Image (cartoon, rainbow, N blue to C red):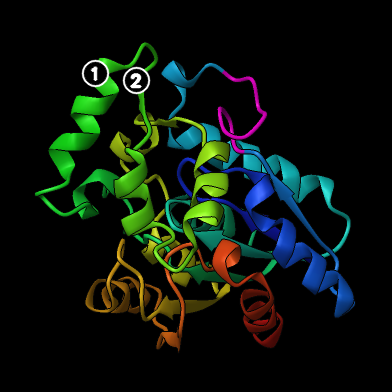
Amino acid sequence: MHTLLVHGGGHGAWCWDGVRAELGVQGIASSALDLPGSGSDPTPRGGIDLEAYISSVIARVDAIEDDVAIVAHSLAGLTATAVGAARPDRISRVIFLAAMIMDTGERGIDSIPEDRRPNYFDMAMQSEDNSFTPPFEEACKRFFPGASEIEARRFYNQLTPQPLGPYLQPNPAGADALVRSGVSASYVLLSQDQTFRPPVARKFAAKVDCAPIEASGDHCWMLTDPDACARQIADLL
Protein backbone atom coordinates (compact mmCIF):
# COMPACT_ATOMS: atom_id res chain seq x y z
CA MET A 1 0.00 0.00 0.00
CA HIS A 2 1.12 3.55 -0.79
CA THR A 3 0.30 6.60 1.34
CA LEU A 4 -0.48 9.77 -0.61
CA LEU A 5 -0.22 12.98 1.42
CA VAL A 6 -2.36 15.89 0.21
CA HIS A 7 -1.69 19.36 1.58
CA GLY A 8 -4.13 22.04 2.65
CA GLY A 9 -4.58 25.64 1.61
CA GLY A 10 -1.47 27.71 0.92
CA HIS A 11 0.87 24.79 1.56
CA GLY A 12 2.60 22.36 -0.80
CA ALA A 13 4.24 18.97 -0.92
CA TRP A 14 7.10 20.46 1.13
CA CYS A 15 4.98 20.51 4.30
CA TRP A 16 5.03 16.70 4.46
CA ASP A 17 8.84 16.29 4.29
CA GLY A 18 9.25 15.50 8.00
CA VAL A 19 6.26 13.15 8.03
CA ARG A 20 7.54 11.30 4.97
CA ALA A 21 10.95 10.85 6.59
CA GLU A 22 9.41 9.22 9.66
CA LEU A 23 7.04 7.08 7.59
CA GLY A 24 10.08 5.86 5.66
CA VAL A 25 11.78 4.84 8.90
CA GLN A 26 8.70 2.74 9.62
CA GLY A 27 8.83 1.14 6.19
CA ILE A 28 5.77 2.94 4.83
CA ALA A 29 5.94 4.08 1.21
CA SER A 30 4.61 7.60 0.72
CA SER A 31 4.56 10.54 -1.64
CA ALA A 32 3.18 14.07 -1.70
CA LEU A 33 2.16 16.37 -4.52
CA ASP A 34 1.76 20.06 -5.20
CA LEU A 35 -1.86 20.79 -6.00
CA PRO A 36 -2.45 23.10 -8.99
CA GLY A 37 -1.09 26.57 -8.27
CA SER A 38 0.52 25.48 -5.00
CA GLY A 39 4.14 24.88 -4.03
CA SER A 40 6.17 24.82 -7.24
CA ASP A 41 3.23 23.97 -9.53
CA PRO A 42 3.04 26.68 -12.24
CA THR A 43 -0.71 26.50 -12.97
CA PRO A 44 -2.17 30.05 -13.04
CA ARG A 45 -4.17 30.48 -9.85
CA GLY A 46 -6.96 32.59 -11.31
CA GLY A 47 -8.73 29.70 -13.03
CA ILE A 48 -8.26 27.00 -10.40
CA ASP A 49 -11.36 25.42 -8.89
CA LEU A 50 -12.12 22.34 -6.80
CA GLU A 51 -12.40 20.16 -9.92
CA ALA A 52 -8.79 21.00 -10.76
CA TYR A 53 -7.68 19.70 -7.36
CA ILE A 54 -9.77 16.56 -7.68
CA SER A 55 -8.48 15.79 -11.18
CA SER A 56 -4.89 16.31 -10.06
CA VAL A 57 -5.17 13.85 -7.18
CA ILE A 58 -7.07 11.27 -9.23
CA ALA A 59 -4.29 11.41 -11.84
CA ARG A 60 -1.71 10.79 -9.12
CA VAL A 61 -3.72 7.87 -7.69
CA ASP A 62 -4.02 6.35 -11.17
CA ALA A 63 -0.24 6.56 -11.60
CA ILE A 64 0.46 4.60 -8.40
CA GLU A 65 0.54 0.84 -8.86
CA ASP A 66 -0.40 -0.13 -5.28
CA ASP A 67 -3.59 0.52 -3.39
CA VAL A 68 -3.57 4.01 -1.94
CA ALA A 69 -4.32 5.49 1.47
CA ILE A 70 -4.96 9.23 1.25
CA VAL A 71 -4.06 11.60 4.07
CA ALA A 72 -5.89 14.89 3.56
CA HIS A 73 -5.05 17.99 5.56
CA SER A 74 -7.40 20.94 6.08
CA LEU A 75 -8.86 22.16 2.74
CA ALA A 76 -7.78 18.87 1.09
CA GLY A 77 -10.71 17.20 2.84
CA LEU A 78 -12.95 18.56 0.07
CA THR A 79 -10.78 16.90 -2.55
CA ALA A 80 -10.36 13.61 -0.69
CA THR A 81 -14.07 12.78 -0.47
CA ALA A 82 -14.45 13.17 -4.22
CA VAL A 83 -11.30 11.18 -5.01
CA GLY A 84 -12.33 8.35 -2.70
CA ALA A 85 -15.80 8.24 -4.24
CA ALA A 86 -14.31 8.23 -7.76
CA ARG A 87 -11.76 5.47 -7.09
CA PRO A 88 -13.21 3.18 -4.39
CA ASP A 89 -11.44 0.19 -5.94
CA ARG A 90 -8.05 1.92 -5.51
CA ILE A 91 -8.42 3.85 -2.26
CA SER A 92 -8.06 1.68 0.83
CA ARG A 93 -8.64 4.46 3.35
CA VAL A 94 -8.94 8.22 3.69
CA ILE A 95 -7.38 9.79 6.78
CA PHE A 96 -8.68 13.30 7.39
CA LEU A 97 -6.15 15.36 9.36
CA ALA A 98 -7.76 18.49 10.84
CA ALA A 99 -9.70 18.52 7.58
CA MET A 100 -12.72 20.34 6.25
CA ILE A 101 -15.46 17.92 5.18
CA MET A 102 -18.60 18.94 3.31
CA ASP A 103 -21.50 17.04 1.77
CA THR A 104 -22.21 16.93 -1.96
CA GLY A 105 -23.30 20.34 -3.16
CA GLU A 106 -21.90 22.24 -0.18
CA ARG A 107 -19.17 24.84 -0.57
CA GLY A 108 -16.01 25.07 1.47
CA ILE A 109 -16.43 28.79 2.06
CA ASP A 110 -19.63 28.12 3.98
CA SER A 111 -17.72 26.24 6.67
CA ILE A 112 -15.49 29.25 7.36
CA PRO A 113 -16.68 31.24 10.41
CA GLU A 114 -18.71 34.26 9.34
CA ASP A 115 -16.35 36.70 11.04
CA ARG A 116 -13.42 35.43 8.91
CA ARG A 117 -15.26 34.85 5.64
CA PRO A 118 -15.21 38.45 4.30
CA ASN A 119 -11.42 38.55 4.68
CA TYR A 120 -11.06 35.73 2.16
CA PHE A 121 -12.98 37.70 -0.48
CA ASP A 122 -11.26 40.99 0.37
CA MET A 123 -7.77 39.52 0.08
CA ALA A 124 -8.64 37.70 -3.16
CA MET A 125 -10.11 40.86 -4.71
CA GLN A 126 -6.93 42.77 -3.90
CA SER A 127 -4.79 40.16 -5.63
CA GLU A 128 -4.13 39.83 -9.35
CA ASP A 129 -5.22 36.20 -9.56
CA ASN A 130 -8.12 35.73 -7.11
CA SER A 131 -5.87 34.28 -4.42
CA PHE A 132 -4.91 35.16 -0.88
CA THR A 133 -2.31 34.65 1.83
CA PRO A 134 -3.14 35.53 5.45
CA PRO A 135 -0.81 37.97 7.21
CA PHE A 136 2.01 36.43 9.22
CA GLU A 137 0.39 37.06 12.60
CA GLU A 138 -2.90 35.48 11.55
CA ALA A 139 -1.15 32.50 9.93
CA CYS A 140 0.83 31.90 13.13
CA LYS A 141 -2.32 32.03 15.25
CA ARG A 142 -4.36 29.68 13.08
CA PHE A 143 -1.80 27.37 11.46
CA PHE A 144 1.21 26.82 13.70
CA PRO A 145 0.90 28.47 17.12
CA GLY A 146 3.06 25.67 18.54
CA ALA A 147 6.08 26.74 16.47
CA SER A 148 8.85 29.05 17.59
CA GLU A 149 9.00 32.40 15.81
CA ILE A 150 11.99 31.22 13.78
CA GLU A 151 10.15 28.06 12.72
CA ALA A 152 6.96 30.02 12.03
CA ARG A 153 8.84 32.43 9.76
CA ARG A 154 10.37 29.51 7.89
CA PHE A 155 6.99 27.85 7.41
CA TYR A 156 5.28 31.10 6.45
CA ASN A 157 7.90 31.98 3.85
CA GLN A 158 7.15 28.71 2.04
CA LEU A 159 3.41 29.35 1.78
CA THR A 160 2.01 30.18 -1.64
CA PRO A 161 -1.14 32.24 -2.33
CA GLN A 162 -4.28 30.13 -2.03
CA PRO A 163 -6.75 30.32 -4.94
CA LEU A 164 -10.24 31.27 -3.76
CA GLY A 165 -11.94 29.19 -6.48
CA PRO A 166 -11.81 25.80 -4.67
CA TYR A 167 -13.70 27.31 -1.73
CA LEU A 168 -16.53 28.55 -3.97
CA GLN A 169 -17.35 25.52 -6.11
CA PRO A 170 -20.02 23.20 -4.68
CA ASN A 171 -18.45 19.85 -3.90
CA PRO A 172 -19.33 17.38 -6.70
CA ALA A 173 -18.88 14.37 -4.37
CA GLY A 174 -18.79 15.09 -0.67
CA ALA A 175 -18.93 13.09 2.53
CA ASP A 176 -22.19 11.38 1.64
CA ALA A 177 -20.65 10.10 -1.62
CA LEU A 178 -17.60 8.79 0.21
CA VAL A 179 -19.74 6.94 2.74
CA ARG A 180 -21.79 5.35 -0.06
CA SER A 181 -18.58 4.26 -1.82
CA GLY A 182 -17.64 2.06 1.15
CA VAL A 183 -14.14 3.57 1.49
CA SER A 184 -13.01 3.55 5.14
CA ALA A 185 -12.46 6.91 6.78
CA SER A 186 -10.65 8.14 9.88
CA TYR A 187 -10.58 11.64 11.33
CA VAL A 188 -7.74 13.05 13.43
CA LEU A 189 -8.89 15.94 15.62
CA LEU A 190 -6.14 18.18 16.97
CA SER A 191 -6.90 19.56 20.42
CA GLN A 192 -5.00 22.84 19.93
CA ASP A 193 -6.36 23.47 16.43
CA GLN A 194 -7.27 27.15 16.05
CA THR A 195 -8.63 26.75 12.51
CA PHE A 196 -11.15 23.95 13.08
CA ARG A 197 -11.69 23.84 16.81
CA PRO A 198 -12.77 20.52 18.36
CA PRO A 199 -16.57 21.12 18.19
CA VAL A 200 -16.30 21.91 14.46
CA ALA A 201 -13.95 18.99 13.82
CA ARG A 202 -16.38 16.59 15.48
CA LYS A 203 -19.12 17.73 13.13
CA PHE A 204 -16.83 17.12 10.17
CA ALA A 205 -16.00 13.61 11.42
CA ALA A 206 -19.69 12.81 11.87
CA LYS A 207 -20.26 13.51 8.18
CA VAL A 208 -18.10 10.49 7.30
CA ASP A 209 -19.60 8.32 10.05
CA CYS A 210 -16.50 8.04 12.23
CA ALA A 211 -15.61 8.96 15.78
CA PRO A 212 -12.66 11.37 15.74
CA ILE A 213 -9.31 10.36 17.14
CA GLU A 214 -8.03 13.19 19.34
CA ALA A 215 -4.35 14.07 19.37
CA SER A 216 -2.41 16.87 21.03
CA GLY A 217 -1.28 19.28 18.36
CA ASP A 218 -2.08 22.41 16.38
CA HIS A 219 -3.58 22.77 12.91
CA CYS A 220 -0.30 22.18 11.06
CA TRP A 221 0.79 19.20 13.14
CA MET A 222 2.72 17.80 10.20
CA LEU A 223 5.04 20.81 10.54
CA THR A 224 5.17 21.38 14.29
CA ASP A 225 5.51 17.70 15.29
CA PRO A 226 6.06 15.62 12.16
CA ASP A 227 7.21 12.49 14.01
CA ALA A 228 4.07 12.32 16.15
CA CYS A 229 1.94 13.07 13.11
CA ALA A 230 3.59 10.25 11.16
CA ARG A 231 3.15 7.79 14.02
CA GLN A 232 -0.55 8.61 14.17
CA ILE A 233 -0.92 8.10 10.45
CA ALA A 234 0.95 4.79 10.65
CA ASP A 235 -1.38 3.60 13.43
CA LEU A 236 -4.38 4.23 11.17
CA LEU A 237 -3.09 2.50 8.05
Can you tell which quarter of the image residue 133 is in?
Answer: top left
Q: Secondary structure at mark 1?
A: helix
Q: x, y percentage for residue 13?
A: 67, 46
Q: Secondary structure at mark 2?
A: loop
How dense is the environment of label 2, judged by Cα within 10 Å: few (below 14), some, or many (20 and up)?
Answer: many
Q: Which residues are magenta?
A: 35-43
Q: Which label was assigned to residue 130?
A: 2
Residue 1 seen anywhere in this rendered image of the structure = no
At horizontal 64% and vertical 63% (from top left) the residue drawn is 70
Q: Nearer the viewer, residue 19 or 146?
A: 146
Quadrant in which the N terminus is drawn: bottom right
**Kind of residue at disc 1:** Met
How dense is the environment of label 1, judged by Cα within 10 Å: few (below 14), some, or many (20 and up)?
Answer: some
At horizontal 64% and vertical 20% (from top left) the residue drawn is 42
Q: Which residue is mark 1?
A: 125
Examine the structure image and report whether residue 41 is included in the region drawn in magenta: yes
Quadrant in which the C terminus is drawn: bottom right
At horizontal 35% and vertical 70% (from top left) the residue drawn is 193
- Please give left or right for residue 190 compared with residue 31 in the image: left
Q: Earlier in the sequence, mark 2 or mark 1?
A: 1
**With respect to residue 14, does 51 lie above or below?**
above
